[in-house]
Amino acid sequence: MTDTDHRVHGTARAADGTALAYQRAGEGPPLVLLAGQANNHHWWDRVRADFHRTRATITLDYRGTGGSGAPDGPYSTRVFADDVVAVLDHLGVERADVYGTSMGGRVAQWVAARHPGRVRRLVLGCTSPGGPHAVERDASVRRALAQPDPATAREVLADLMYTPAWRAAHPGPYTTLGDPGMPPHARRGHLAASNGHDAWDALPHIAAPALVLHGDQDRLTPPDNLALLADRIPDARAHLFPGARHAYFEEHRAEAGALVAEFLA
């Protein structure tokens, strides 16, 4: 393991032998931060340090991203959840708080449902239960994201993540727009994993207290999913951020960070 910029980097192994790069920073009880689809741990770069007043944060590069291995398959939110547990086992962490956003929220649902003894408190952000019960993005958003020109598609995604006013004040670069080093097969695998997620039947079995967060202007994952999750998970509360798009955790950093810190405390 190496320490760079107060962040400890290491490698764990998944059950199938895939190398899983992880990063740990800060001091205190462990908080696992899970990134969105086709992103690595840099998703959290702007806000990670906010948690270090009281928490040690743990991130990982999903298989197919960052410093982790990129096998041909399988890729699913359940597999990613098992990878999270493999990292916790490697670090000797018996129980942690888990905060997942976007696809990371889908992964976090499986961590909490399949490994209830490992999750103390659960935070789900800008995510959905998946499957037929979820409220999906509309066709215009799907068409816009399917732009053949990478630069145009990246601009579309940035607009879905942040409001124009926030982008004007924070010109980037943005670390939430995907891992540019992903091989094509891994990118396709991540898309299939996110699209194939369906935890509806598992949600009532989540034992950890949960906080569900969403921006009310989120067109990437519509905010109607907030109520679906909060109603389905037995001990859940919800909060909607007015004026926020998908990356509420950055644009409404102070409010979101305070809410999560209060909930975890």
Image (cartoon, rainbow, N blue to C red):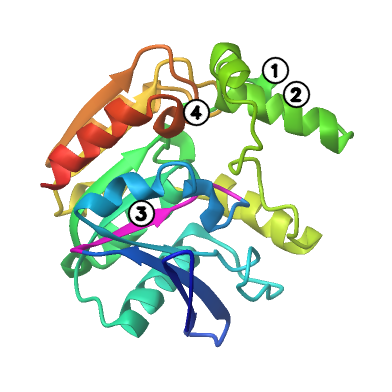
Horizontal relation, residue 181 to residue 91: left or right: right
Instruction: Give the image location of residue 227, x and y in percent.
Output: 28, 25
- Tag 4 secondary structure: loop
Asked if disc 2 and disc 1 are in contact, CB closer than 8 Å, the reply is yes
- Assess whether residue 36 is covered by the magenta stretch: yes
Circle 3 residue: 108
Residue drawn at the location 78% of the way across and 31% of the way down = 153
Tell me the tag on residue 140. Answer: 1
If you read the primary sequence from the N terminus, does the residue marked by circle 2 or circle 4 appear first?
A: 2
Q: Which residue is mark 4?
A: 246
Q: CA distance from mark 2 to mark 3?
A: 28 Å
Which residues, given as a range, are shown in magenta? 28-37
Which amino acid lies under the numbered mark 4 shown in the image of this protein? His
Name the mark on residue 239.
none
Q: Earlier in the sequence, mark 1 or mark 3?
A: 3
Confirm whether the magenta stretch covers residue 172: no
